[in-house]
Amino acid sequence: MITQTIALFRYQLTGIVNRRLLILLSAILLLAVLLNRFVVELALLHSDAIGLSVMADFLRYSLVLVMLITLSDQIAQDYQTSQFHRLLAMPLARHQYLSAQWLVTTCLAAMLAVPVFVLMWLMSPLSQAGYWGAAVFLELLLVGQFAVLATLNLQKLPLAVMFGLALYLLSKLAPLIAIMLTQSSPIYEEESGFQFASVLFSALQYVLPDANAFARNDLLDQPTQLLSSWLGQLGQVLVYVFFLQMIILFDFYRKEFD
């Protein structure tokens, strides 16, 4: 069983890691360096710190988008090419496919996070580079689970990417939305639609992860807090990954592939 899972993992990984992905990753890294130099030249005070933060955020959001599109495209192609039908005709359990997909997600997140660590290391202390690379890895791992869940349900690449991106952005914007709801005019608080939205969002806050806890720029100049912050992120990711994996496994087993 393990041999079959590893073989499927290698097959899926070779379909993702190709020349196109390497060229795209190289272009993102080059643009990040150019953006860093531009901001450093433009800033008047604390130019190096500002340039490093801008570069780090550019890498972070660019790689989140790459992760979403790459994983969603790979699973969507399994639907379009009837790969699931062939897999189910083989002596291969569905949880083995999901296990292989989990290994692909983890490997891809690591492959995308390592260049971030190396680039940050060239421009910042090792502790900061290590924190940022590890935090980006955890964030990509979580985003990868969003992509798998969305694509297995929606099956279409554009819809899956939009749904996964919506989950990510909702997690990122949750504090801002909470402030908007709490600081709104008392006139709106009497509206039934506003009350329903407030209750719904309050419930969502207990389900969605705190995406703002990942790769925090304000910790780049506080090396003593890097480890404790990353450990908190690790605990959060482990909980949500387990939760999402259970949902994905349940949903995948109830599907019928004609």
Image: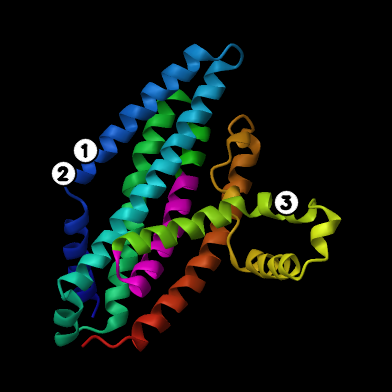
The magenta span reads: 134-156
Q: Nearer the viewer, mark 3 or mark 2?
A: 3
User: Could you say whether the residue bearing mark 2 is in a helix, strand or loop?
Assistant: helix
Question: Callout 2, which amino acid?
Answer: Arg
Classify 49 as above or below 154: above
The span from disc 3 to disc 2 (Cα, nearest Å) is: 44 Å
Prevailing SS of the magenta stretch:
helix
Question: Callout 1, which amino acid?
Answer: Ile
Is disc 3 in contact with disc 1, using a CB cutoff of under 8 Å? no
Q: Which mark is residue 23?
A: 1
x and y percentages locating residue 166 in the rendered image: 48, 58
Name the residue rendered at 63%, 55% in the picture. 174
| Crowd around label 2: few <14 · some 14–19 · many ≥20 (10 Å) | few
Residue 11 vs residue 61: left or right?
A: left
Question: Is 142 included in the stretch rendered in magenta?
Answer: yes
The span from disc 3 to disc 1 (Cα, nearest Å) is: 41 Å
Q: Determine which residue is flagged by label 2.
A: 19
Name the residue rendered at 43%, 49% in the picture. 137
- In terms of sequence position, does the residue under pointer 3 or pointer 2 come before the other? 2
x and y percentages locating residue 43 in the rendered image: 55, 15
Which quadrant holds the N terminus?
bottom left
x and y percentages locating residue 69 in the rendered image: 32, 54
Name the residue rendered at 40%, 82% in the picture. 251
User: Could you say whether the residue bearing mark 1 is in a helix, strand or loop?
Assistant: helix
Is disc 2 in contact with disc 1, using a CB cutoff of under 8 Å? yes
Residue 225 vs residue 33: left or right?
A: right
Q: Determine which residue is flagged by label 3.
A: 180
Residue 199 appears in the figure: yes
Classify 92 as above or below 240: below
